[in-house]
Amino acid sequence: MRFLSVNPVFLTVAASTATAQNLSIAAWADASSGIAYKLAIPDVSSAPFPLLMSIVAPVDVTWAAFATGACMLRSPLVVAWPSGTNVIVTARWATQYHPPLPYANTTLITYSTSSVNATHWTASFLCAKGCSNWYGGSIDPKNSNATFGYAASNRPVAVPASTNSSIPYHNIAKGHFDIDLTRAKNAIATFQAASKGVGPIW
């Protein structure tokens, strides 16, 4: 398997993901931090495929991350944080236990439904390319017990408005969780409708 030769893309488009009708979603929440992760995928048999996701976190969480592998090392990380009334979504990669660096082999589309209010912030996004397969691994969409990693902090992001900002240590949450991806599968047409015509691009 080779790295995808795709530059990182960060777009904002109008769409509704969390409230999409008839969309099958797999979800998991961390009780200690209050962060919730939701995931939907198309009905495919193998990678590569896009991931439609949301991360909802309390406002005291300065960043939250989702690792497409079981831990932060050598798998794509999607990191999100609030920046004023906006939400930043960026991809990272780590080869050692240090702050992960920007990762250039994904296409991320951030939806305008991403928001910040008095109690929580929400990142709604599509990882169109580069999250379901990577150098050394992939996600099996048939896995009923797929393992993903997560992490979060309440320390300030260095430059919140920048997708390339460094992030502080994950001091309030880290670990992994299992979800049934077969419950997150959606017919291709349903998935494309939820992503507002972004596909087919996988």
Image: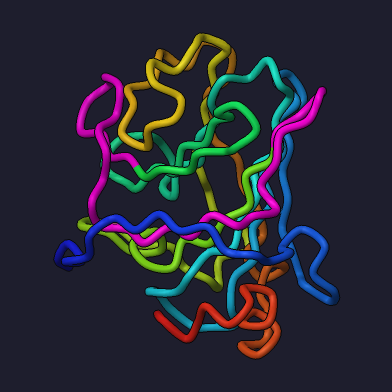
What colouring does the structure picture have?
Answer: rainbow
Point 40% across, 54% down: residue: 10
Task: Relative to 103, say whether 107 is above or below.
Answer: below
Determine the residue positioned at 53% across, 64% down. 51
Q: Percent x, y for residue 44?
A: 52, 83
- State the residue at coordinates (64%, 58%): 39
The image quarter containing residue 162 is top left
Q: Per the image, is 101 magenta?
A: yes
Residue 93 found in image quarter: top left
**Point 34% across, 27% down: residue:** 165
Residue 104 x, y percent position in the rendering: 23, 51
Position of residue 193 relative to residue 145, above or below, is: below
Q: How many marks can you see?
A: 0
Where residue 14 sits in the image (x, y, percent)?
A: 65, 65
Say which of 10 and 78 sits in front.
10
Reply above or below: 148 against 129. above
**Which quarter of the image is occupied by the C terminus?**
bottom left
Asked if residue 118 is among those painted magenta in the image, a careful observer would answer: yes
Residue 155 x, y percent position in the rendering: 51, 9
Left or right: residue 115 compared with residue 106: right
Specify the segment rendered in magenta.
Answer: 92-121
Residue reaching furthest to the bottom: 189
Residue 140 lies left or right of residue 76; in this view the side is: right
Q: Quadrant of residue 73?
A: top left
Figure quadrant of the N terminus: bottom left
